[in-house]
Amino acid sequence: MTKWEFPEDFIWGAATSAYQIEGAWNEDGKGESIWDRFSHTPGKIDDGTTGDIADDHYHRWHDDIALMKEIGLKAYRFSVSWPRILPAGRGQVNQAGLDFYSRLVDGLLEAGIIPFLTLYHWDLPQTLEDEGGWPVRSTAEAFVEYTGVMVSALGDRVKHWMTHNEPWVVADHGYRIGMFAPGRKNTEDAIAASHHVLLSHGLAMPIIREMVDDAEVGIVYNLQRSIPASPSLADRKAAYLSDGEFIRWYIDPIAGRGYPADMVELYGSSMNFVREGDLDIISAPVDFIGVNYYARIIARSTEIPEEENLPRTVFPVDDFTEMGWEVFPEGLYNILGRLHFDYNFPAIYVSENGAAFKDEVGPDGEIDDPRRVAYYKNHLIQASRAITAGIPLKGYFAWSLMDNFEWSRGLSKRFGLIHVDYESQQRILKSSAKYYRQVIEANAVID
Ligand code: FCB
């Protein structure tokens, strides 16, 4: 038996995002978001569901905090719906929206749970999209106004701020391949979007620091190592470019290294949306980086014909999730190492990690999810190894607190520690939630 221990002050949490759980999409003065528009457009969501109600968390937040307490969470990562606060994206503030988050934060603090607030988890006000969305600079400026409103309302109580969740997804899925809201397909727009997202992060940083005493501020990325599918030169190059797309493009500018020249060349972008001084703004020092880790990438070259390439390396595969993602726990250790040893930021959080599996409610009403339990156990062991290796990993957030609206996959993909019956809105702790409670209590994984 091995005991994988964690530091005394390790932060155990779970994460959600506004559009995925809140529902109440048009209540109390909330404006329309790009995800409202997108999910209401026929054909965009695999199972035809929407986030109109989702987990109805907007009305059930109080009970949800009680469940967090039952699991023993020390922290909760949630996001704020920008159009709930500024229905038109800028200008008029919706007090009812602010009150909702203020009550939520008070409830968390009363329960002894540290709030980690993400400002942008993909639900842009539709009015801003109508004015051009992230490909235009004025959206970054509107984000600054929104940040100011949030820090003045909650900065006395919320100390942990995350500007953006997964800028790559915003730019790539939103503007290049159009699989996510707003569903546009234009590569140059996507590159401009990536720049304006990073710029908005950099512009928001000093505002959060100025207005929040003892603020800890960072940004959240979806990260993974890219492994060549074979040792061929072409595949090694493909892996390096994939690393460029996901890691170097988004982290080099934050680390003061600018955009990687090889990627600019590959994209053939004019980069004419980058203004003098932007890169200095973007590289404002962060307190931490949040890593959302789900799987690794196996990169196969598309530049040479398959028959000219070396045969693919056979990787032993353990399991796949319902999303079709490979379960690869060591990849968490690998990516934390890549981030720390190549960039050396002061702290890292695993801001998301988890798995969708088919859950069944047993005859006794219980949900036994052994695959998810194994998933958490094996990933947490890798997190513990990373700490032993000297990586400043300060906390871990399970994705997700509860089953929710999984973007273009709809309500049918369940990532929760807590099962949600969408008809009755009944919540049930899965075995994985009980397992996580034990880990938190022991501050260790026992294998
Ligand atoms: C991440 C998102 C999160 C959730 C998980 C499964 O990319 O940040 O909202 O959908 O994937």
Image (cartoon, rainbow, N blue to C red):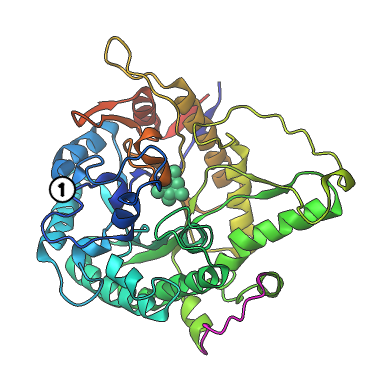
Viewer-nearest residue: 272 or 59: 272
Name the residue that disc number 1 marks: 107
Q: Is residue 146 visible?
A: yes
Q: Is residue 254 left or right of residue 122?
A: right
- Estimate the x, y position of residue 139 in percent, counting from the top left: 36, 75
Q: Which residues are magenta?
A: 267-276
Q: Is residue 367 left or right of residue 345?
A: left
Q: Residue furthest right?
A: 308
- Estimate the x, y position of residue 34 in percent, counting from the top left: 33, 60
Q: Is residue 137 left or right of residue 125?
A: right
Q: Residue sitting at 59 percent across and 70 percent down?
A: 252
Residue 299, above or below 320? below
Give SS at disc 1. Answer: helix
Q: Residue furthest front?
A: 42
Residue 358, above or below 77? above
Q: How many numbered markers are drawn?
A: 1
Question: Which quadrant holds residue 310?
Answer: top right
**Quarter occupied by the N terminus:** top right
Q: Is residue 89 left or right of residue 391?
A: left
- Estimate the x, y position of residue 112 in percent, counting from the top left: 22, 45
Residue 156, above or below 16? below
- Estimate the x, y position of residue 383 in percent, counting from the top left: 53, 41
Q: Is residue 269 magenta?
A: yes
Q: Is residue 390 visible?
A: no
Give the residue type that dot 1 points to: Gly
Q: Is residue 145 magenta?
A: no
Q: Residue sitting at 71 percent across and 71 percent down?
A: 262
